[in-house]
Amino acid sequence: MLIQKLKIENLKSIKSMEMECSRLNLLIGTNSSGKSSILQGLLLVAQNLELNCGLNGALLSLGSFAESRCLYGEKKTIKVSLWNENEGMSLLFGQTEDGKLSVARETSSEKTVELFFEGLNIRKRKIQYLSNDRIGPQNVYAKNMTLEDEIGSDGRYAIAFLNQHHADVVEPEFCKGNVDYTLLGQVNWWLSYIVDTVISTEEILGADLVKADYTMYDVLRIRPTNIGSGISYLISVLIVCLSSPKDSVIVLENPEIHLHPSAQAKLCEFLYFVSGNQRQLFIESHSDHVFNGFRAGIAAGEMEKEAVNIQFISLDEERVSQAMKVRIGRMGRVENQKKNLFDQFDLDLNKMIGLPGRKNGTVFK
């Protein structure tokens, strides 16, 4: 499934927003500007294609209709529309007179419904979601005793999944290193590349638990709680992406949590690699190192500009979310720079060297 266009109406701070999509879609912007709402719109469609669960389901829970509807919108329904080539489908969420939630579908044909149902099928792991509320380092990790292959939006079953599927063979074009083509081998190739670490897992006999050990700088059997927490947050990202089936959609919130800037730059390489192998990524990030990682990749010719869609999300004067596609020019230059588009470094640098700067629209010296 390749989502080519996404339109959201009347959801939270989004009154009406339409966004063209690429293989890799990076959402950046200030806090509470609407980035998460865009991801939530996509997840709402996925969890309602099969289960018809409304605003609260397997991937996310938004609460009541009144909480989720845009306060500034005139329409009485929340509408999310997706397009794949010439096929399009919309889901409408409304409220009946007795206060119950209603879900309706708009589409040109049942064939279109089947296309999106198959392309965003949760049970087949065709859509994967990792929230920013991922679990950190643990001494032991739980198995999923209900759905065998579910990793969980908080990554709680990622280690158990890796332990169970460590020997699964990864498709050749999705492998690096030309040494170990298993899931564990590829997870460790990238883990070593990004943070100089490898992982091993072991089932605890007689318990529904799995433990993990790390090796770093020839130090063996380091428990997760005794190694940098960024590694524990990173491992679930690697497992989700490398175990994802072809033509799947992967939604990631802040994949760079607790990672050093150099590791974040290498993480950008990984995410681009994943998106270039028949997977589509939707990423929310607050990191200028992630932003600059993709800028550098484009500038160096290592990443195709058309394959990286960077959207700056901001609130207008009416506190309504707006999306602006960031244009990257020669040498990674941002051609349409805007206030709060990762400009804080320049503002701080100007202040340190005594040049006039600007803060909240006011010039300071």
Image (spheres, helix red, strand yellow):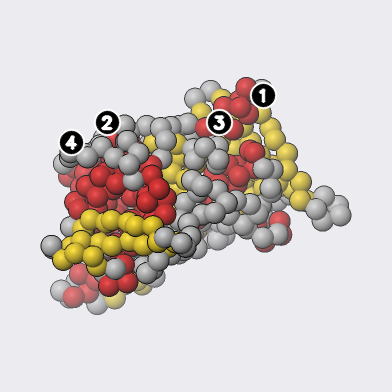
Where residue 211 appears, x then y in whole percent? Answer: 36, 62
Which residue position holds label 1?
Answer: 110
Q: Disc 4 residue type?
A: Asn
Looking at the image, is mark 1 or mark 3 earlier in the sequence?
Answer: 1
Q: Earlier in the sequence, mark 1 or mark 4?
A: 1
Residue 290, x across and y down, in percent: 29, 54
Any part of residue 96 in sight: yes
- On the image, numbered disc 4 is attached to which residue? 178
Depth check: give the residue in front, 14 or 287: 287
User: Dot 4 surroundings within 10 Å: few (below 14), some, or many (20 or more)?
Assistant: few
Residue occupied by mark 2: 172
Asked whether disc 2 touches disc 3, contact meaning CB atoms under 8 Å apart, the reply is no
Which of the pair 225/136 is nearer the observer? 225
Between the residue at mark 1 and the residue at mark 3, the CA separation in whole angstroms equals 12 Å
Amino acid type, callout 3: Glu
Q: Nearer the viewer, residue 107 or 10?
A: 107
- In this picture, residue 89 sits left or right of residue 206: right
